Amino acid sequence: MIHVVAKSIVKKELQEEYKKIASELVDMTRKEKGCISYALYQDKDNPMILTFLEVWDTMESLKAHFKAPHFTALVPRLGKMRESSEVNVYTPAD
Amino acid sequence: MIHVVAKSIVKKELQEEYKKIASELVDMTRKEKGCISYALYQDKDNPMILTFLEVWDTMESLKAHFKAPHFTALVPRLGKMRESSEVNVYTPAD
């Protein structure tokens, strides 16, 4: 299984719109093949931190996600609202 | 539910020992009340990044974890092997 942590800093005044678009992305992504879980979370101590925590069955499914129409349409819109972001793709440590 | 992402940078020469201690911590933590999942992951593109991805039922269970004997014994040992680390505690974005 593949775990993705996509962590972003989003200014308070943009959060309502950010969460609305993220919600569309979540709804459509959860219907994708190989998506085990996908949701947006907020840091308990710093509400500017909004993070997608994702689980995928294989790298192939994750790669297909990057080409999905909702991904290519919505993620650039989210990108414009971020102050910064970092994405880590994880596999279990051996 | 509470999600924790505890991300650390660990030098290559310390990773074997780090993973051994982490494995003890994982085994014992999974037996704790309220621990839904707990495991160590490695970044696919940067193997120096080792991250615990955790799910807890409540903040109370997470707080109890910080006081567990295996946590107070093992986490400082892991801490000494880290170049840097960051911990985020997440709740679902509203």
Image (cartoon, coloured by chain):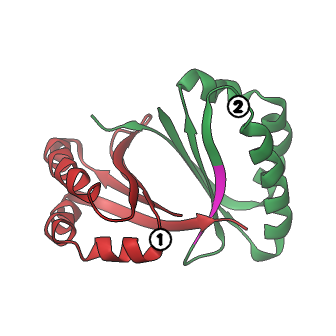
Chain colours: A red, B green
Q: Main secondary structure of the magenta part?
A: strand
Q: Which residue lies furthest to the top in this view?
A: B60
Quadrant assignment, res B64: top right
| Disc 2: host chain | B
Quadrant assignment, res B31: top right
List x then y, in percent, for residue B58.
53, 25
Residue placed under numbered mark 1 in the picture: A58
| Residue type at the position of mark 1 | Thr
Q: What element carries label 2?
A: helix
Q: Nearer the viewer, mark 1 or mark 2?
A: 1
Callout 2 crowding tier (Cα within 10 Å): few <14, some 14–19, many ≥20? few
| Residue type at the position of mark 2 | Phe
Callout 1 crowding tier (Cα within 10 Å): few <14, some 14–19, many ≥20? some
| Disc 1: host chain | A
Apparent side of residue B74 relative to residue B53 in the rendered image (left or right): right
Q: Which residue is drawn at 79% across and 53% down?
A: B23
Q: Which of A8 and A75 is in front in this view?
A: A75
Q: Does any portion of residue B30 appear in the rendered image?
A: yes
Residue B11 vertical position relative to residue A85 in the rendered view, above or below:
below
Q: In the image, is residue B42 part of the stretch drawn in magenta?
A: yes
Q: Which residue is drawn at 21% across and 65% down?
A: A75
List x then y, in percent, for residue A15.
20, 44
Apparent side of residue A77 relative to residue A10 in the rendered image (left or right): left
Which residues fall within the magenta stretch?
A: B39-43
Q: Is mark 1 on a helix, strand or loop?
A: loop
Q: In the image, is residue A56 part of the stretch drawn in magenta?
A: no
List x then y, in percent, for residue B52.
63, 52
Q: Which residue is drawn at 13% across and 47% down?
A: A17
Residue placed under numbered mark 2 in the picture: B66
Labels 1 and 2 in the same subunit? no
For the C terminus of chain A, the quadrant is bottom right
Task: Give the CA distance from mark 1 to mark 2.
Answer: 33 Å
